[in-house]
């Protein structure tokens, strides 16, 4: 079972600090959540925490994940999601054996897919599950057809929510599903949005504005931690078609995200090459770059970018961040672009409409709609002078609603409240 256990001790815990276990799925945007959670836990004396990274799968399970029979997989009839829940249950159960539940004041797990093991804990152990979606939403909006055979997964997820003392959601979108689709009382559900705080080097980079009035992160990216699951070796490079530096008069478009096709990178690349290759330069930052990239015009592909470089150099170099994702939850990439003062074109999926104000800090389009994407890029070309002001409005919204320096203390306040129920009742 792949996991990494870290005792946090740089801040002296208080005498009555809550003995806490924090399990965090460590992949994709969850790495960013892990980074900021660790940073804030490390200096909060209310917690005596152990932070545990849960890697997605071991080698055998990774092999099984590739063995799907269509159309069973597309219909959800392979029960893959159910088996992921069961695998994670064993993974966390194995790790929990190291700890005496009588000594625990709090168990926090992100996300619910890893939280089945809380059903095995004594009821006296306070538990909090945080989420960025529900599987009901995923089954509705992603690859699955609606099928009664998915009911087993949804019932298991409902039991997890019922057992939790608190469900923390990154968005109103997911919180509403917990309440409406699973019948969980609203009093047990709290929205604390995910967020980003800029690293120390990022000051005054766009039109003389200070990008963030809040505190700064500790620069973990310099130690090889990457946003959006980028490779941790600290290098950055282009693809075989060469590193094309954008010409000064071209509109600079950017895309960031693994899961290149799911996040619409293929659609963006197609629209760019067919309509805008001579008018705009496109930078793609992705861990799974497209195949057949020879002959692309005005395209740079980067597969490995440290987070600090991403935030201080790469993102601020874009005139427009384009993220035509087909299905998503609460993507950090959108928040990062807004935080860096870059206007955003994205889709009306998941919690993105909560992030981007259409026509204010960017534009929202329908997923998979090539014409709408091309129309908004054309608008940006014709109204280029308006983009900095649009990016500034998005930055202001990110600073208000999606600053890690604000939201992670709110999250820890909520967790400390749950932990006090344990200490108040006596151990």
Image (spheres, rainbow, N blue to C red):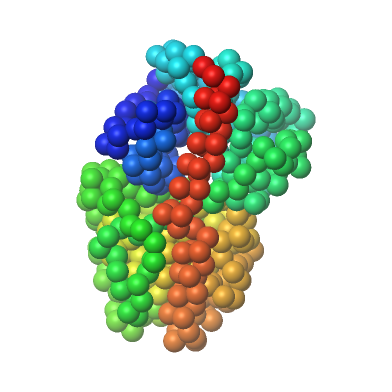
Q: Position of residue 197 (x, y in %)?
A: 39, 57
State whether residue 386 is above or below residue 118: below
State whether residue 410 is above or below residue 95: below
Side of 83 where 40 appears, left or right: left
For residue 31, what is the image quadrant?
top left
Side of 204 where 146 appears, left or right: right
Q: Is residue 15 visible?
A: yes
- Residue at the spot 41% in from the left edge and 30% down from the top edge: 17
Q: Position of residue 27 (x, y in %)?
A: 42, 39
For residue 358, what is the image quadrant?
bottom right
Q: Which quarter of the figure is the N terminus placed in?
A: top left
State whether residue 26 is above or below residue 253: above
For residue 356, what is the image quadrant?
bottom right
Q: Is residue 38 visible?
A: no
Q: Position of residue 124 (x, y in %)?
A: 59, 18
- Residue at the spot 64% in from the left edge and 63% down from the top edge: 366
Looking at this view, is 65 or 184 the one in front? 184
- Residue at the spot 25% in from the left edge and 45% down from the top edge: 224
Q: Position of residue 268 (x, y in %)?
A: 49, 64
Looking at this view, is 334 or 101 the one in front? 101
- Residue at the spot 36% in from the left edge and 76% down from the top edge: 209
């Amino acid at each position: 079972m792949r996991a990494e256990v870290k005792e946090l001790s740089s801040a002296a815990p208080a005498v009555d600090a809550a003995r806490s276990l924090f399990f965090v799925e460590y992949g994709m945007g969850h790495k960013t959540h892990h980074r900021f959670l660790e940073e804030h836990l490390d200096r909060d004396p209310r917690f005596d925490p152990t932070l545990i990274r849960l890697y997605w799968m071991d080698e055998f399970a990774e092999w099984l994940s590739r063995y799907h029979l269509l159309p069973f997989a597309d219909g959800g009839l392979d029960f893959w999601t159910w088996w992921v829940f069961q695998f994670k249950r064993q993974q966390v159960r194995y790790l929990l054996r190291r700890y005496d539940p009588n000594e625990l004041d709090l168990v926090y797990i992100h996300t619910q897919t890893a939280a089945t093991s809380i059903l095995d804990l004594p009821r006296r152990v306070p538990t909090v599950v945080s989420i960025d979606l529900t599987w009901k939403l995923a089954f509705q909006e992603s690859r699955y057809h609606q099928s009664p055979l998915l009911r087993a997964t949804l019932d298991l997820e409902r039991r997890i929510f019922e057992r939790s003392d608190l469900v923390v959601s990154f968005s109103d979108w997911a919180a509403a599903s917990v309440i409406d689709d699973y019948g969980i009382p609203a009093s047990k559900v709290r929205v604390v949005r995910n967020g980003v705080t800029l690293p120390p080097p990022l000051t005054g980079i766009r039109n003389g504005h200070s990008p963030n009035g809040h505190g700064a992160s500790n620069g973990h990216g310099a130690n090889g931690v990457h946003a959006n699951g980028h490779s941790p070796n600290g290098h950055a490079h282009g693809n075989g078609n060469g590193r094309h530096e954008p010409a000064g008069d071209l509109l600079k478009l950017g895309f960031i995200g693994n899961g290149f096709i799911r996040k619409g990178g293929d659609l963006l690349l197609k629209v760019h090459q067919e309509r805008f290759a001579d008018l705009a330069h496109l930078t793609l930052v992705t861990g799974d770059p497209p195949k057949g990239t020879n002959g692309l015009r005005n395209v740079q592909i980067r597969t490995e970018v440290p987070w600090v470089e991403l935030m201080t150099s790469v993102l601020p170099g874009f005139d427009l961040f384009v993220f035509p994702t087909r299905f998503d939850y609460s993507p950090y990439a959108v928040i990062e672009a807004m935080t860096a003062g870059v206007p955003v074109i994205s889709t009306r999926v998941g919690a993105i409409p909560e992030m981007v104000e259409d026509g204010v800090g960017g534009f929202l389009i329908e997923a998979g709609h090539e014409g709408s994407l091309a129309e908004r890029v054309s608008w940006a070309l014709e109204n280029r002078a308006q983009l900095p002001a649009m990016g500034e409005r998005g930055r202001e919204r990110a600073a208000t609603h999606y600053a890690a320096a604000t939201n992670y203390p709110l999250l820890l306040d909520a967790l400390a409240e749950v932990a006090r129920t344990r200490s108040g009742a006596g151990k």
